[in-house]
Image (cartoon, rainbow, N blue to C red):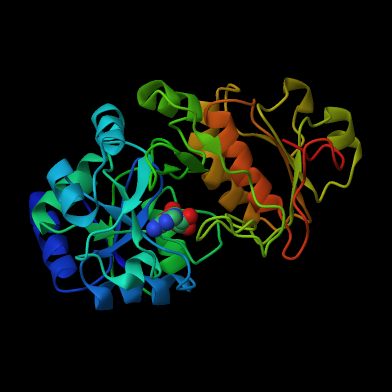
Amino acid sequence: MAKIYRGTKGNLQFLAQRLRAGELVAVPSETVYGLAADALSASACRKIFRAKGRPPSDPLIVHVGSVGQAGSVAELSDAARQLMRKFWPGPLTMVLPKKPAVPEVVTSGQPSVAIRMPAHPLFLKLLAETGTPLAAPSANPFGYVSPTTAQHVQDGLGKRIKYILEGGASEVGVESTIVDLRDPRRPRLLRPGKITKADLERVLGVKVELVPTPDSTAAMLAPGMMLRHYSPHTPVIAHRKLSLKRALSGDAREAWVFLTRPAAAKAAKNIFGWAETSSSRQVAHNLFALLRKLDGQSWKNIHVEYAQRGGLGDAINDRLTRAAAKTGTRAPHKGRGKGLSI
Ligand code: AMP
Ligand code: MG
């Protein structure tokens, strides 16, 4: 099993030294926990792919501790600098032309690199202590639900890694927004997150193109954008709106996750709520922890209710659509299928 370290000065110095020596350390961030390695070392980054079982075609996000460090790994356009000023440190990843210092394994051979400055204070301290940018995808076996606590990392990767930094439950709870800024005049939203398309448009002063969820598992609009992802082992069925009547009268071995748990569900053991209120902030914060918990409880199916549309709700619904996607099937589309479109 991996050892879980509290964020003391001595522990941070030790973990930074392990990172500089080319080892992997799982780190807390405000989005989800990441599995970090020295981003400038190809051999260290290869270990990330091995530990996660991640295909080499899925590039890694490089985390930086300063704008100066960002400039050492990517070409920074004015648009990129504007977004950094407004949203960093924070859950916004930018895809930019890469600098030669970044090994090919990090970017899956592409001339672009994805970069972000995380907001979690311990991650920032570790970056400062290590002195090198850190490549870090989510710290989970590839394709499974992302981890939002140190224990989640232990559960999924504890046998494959040695070091986990404890930083509490991830505040946001879903992965960063990814914006493609390779052409700063034509920004594209590759992955929805807490920073919304409207937030980006307000700062950039141009329209941001929405890259839709791909409509088959094979389709990949950008590297790593597989349809089925973030998926529990138990089948997930996503609904625009859940019916309490149907949940109460159905098979007791099916779980139902409402936006908030209906009071009329009384003591029914198979009825849950994402959060105390229907606020997307709360739903996102609890999303992956509840999916993981239910996945450990041998339900036949997990029925889930989509979040309210817009803002962070769109990011939640993107993850739920992917969690519910079956390998080799088509994704739900607006106006097609029953209750599944978002
Ligand atoms: P994560 O699993 O949260 O680390 O997400 C990493 C994701 O960032 C990948 O799956 C890609 O969708 C995206 N990404 C990383 N690097 C690039 C890149 N150079 N170009 C386009 N997308 C990228
Ligand atoms: Mg991931």
Taking 96 as reference, is 9 left or right? left
Q: Is residue 19 above or below residue 32?
A: below
> Residue 186: in sight, yes or no?
yes
Q: Is residue 42 above or below residue 251?
A: below
Question: Number of callouts in the render?
Answer: 0
Quadrant placement of the C terminus: top right
Give coordinates of residue 324: x percent, y percent: 71, 51
Q: Closer to the camera, 154 or 116?
A: 116
- The picture quadrant for ligand 1 comes to bottom left
Quadrant placement of the N terminus: bottom left
Q: Closer to the camera, 188 or 53?
A: 188
Residue in the image at 79% along x and 40% along y: 340
Taking 162 as reference, is 194 left or right? right
Give coordinates of residue 237: x percent, y percent: 76, 47
Residue in the image at 29% along x and 38% along y: 80
Taking 324 as reference, is 78 left or right? left
Residue 86 sits in quarter: top left
Residue 132 sits in quarter: bottom left
Q: Is residue 311 above or below residue 111?
A: above
Give coordinates of residue 207: x percent, y percent: 49, 28
> Residue 7: in sight, yes or no?
no
Q: Is residue 62 above or below residue 187?
A: below
Taking 38 as reference, is 30 left or right? right
Residue in the image at 40% along x and 36% along y: 185
Q: Closer to the camera, 301 or 105?
A: 105
Give coordinates of residue 270: x percent, y percent: 75, 42
